[in-house]
Image (tube, rainbow, N blue to C red):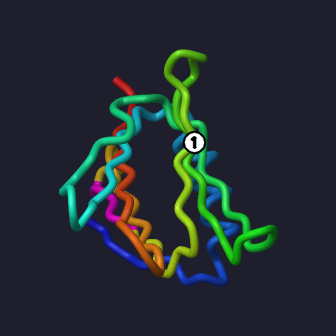
Amino acid sequence: MNTYEVPDKQWTNFVDRFSRDHAGWPATIEVLSADAGPQKVAVELPLQGLSFDPDGSRPCTVVIGAGDDPSANLSHTIEMPLHIRVAEADDGTQCTVEIEPARGSKTLLHLHRPA
């Protein structure tokens, strides 16, 4: 298992590359709430991509897009992220991205190579 933290100055390049490399991979999005425990927001939806917006009405956001069908399509927004961490299997068949915001719950994006 290869784990690393993405330096904040590289977030834009990271999300662009990561989105290209993992487009269509089955994605499970999990929010780790201190109050309610782990909550799955999406299960096994094709990854559309990640985006990073350093400007706009908020100081910063990361958005995860998943789903390729109007009935199963979502965008999950993480406001004011502090850390982006990645854990990748040595064989490249699966990975998890952890996004930790300044306030609120961490988000985990679990991906595995399509069958």
Question: Residue 56 at what x, y percent from top left?
Answer: 81, 68
Residue at the image position 50 percent from the left and 81 percent from the top: 82
Corner quadrant of residue 85? bottom left
Q: Is residue 89 left or right of residue 73?
A: left
Q: Quadrant of residue 43?
A: top left
Q: In front here: 66 or 37?
A: 37
- What residue is at 32 percent from the left and 49 percent from the top? 30
Q: Is residue 74 left or right of residue 88?
A: right
Which residue is found at the position 36% from the left and 30% from the top? 44
Looking at the picture, does residue 79 appear above or below residue 49? below
Extreme-front residue of the structure: 35
Q: Is residue 46 above or below residue 37?
A: above
Local secondary structure at mark 1:
strand
| Pick the front one: 32 or 85 | 32
Q: Give x and y (percent) for residue 83.
A: 46, 78
Report the residue that reaches farthest toward the right.
56
Residue 61 on the magenta segment:
no
Q: Quadrant of the C terminus?
A: top left
Frontmost residue, 112 versus 46 = 46
* 47 left or right, relative to 113: right
Locate residue 4, reporting x and y percent: 38, 76
Q: Residue at x 22, y 53 (%)?
A: 38
Rendering coords of residue 96 (x, y %): 34, 56
Does 20 sit left or right of 112 as displayed?
right
Q: Amino acid at mark 1?
A: Ser
Q: Main secondary structure of the magenta part?
A: strand
The residue range painted magenta reads 86-90
User: Mark 1 Cα within 10 Å, few/some/many (few <14, many 20+)?
Assistant: some
Which quarter shows the N terminus?
bottom left
Q: State the residue position of label 1.
A: 75
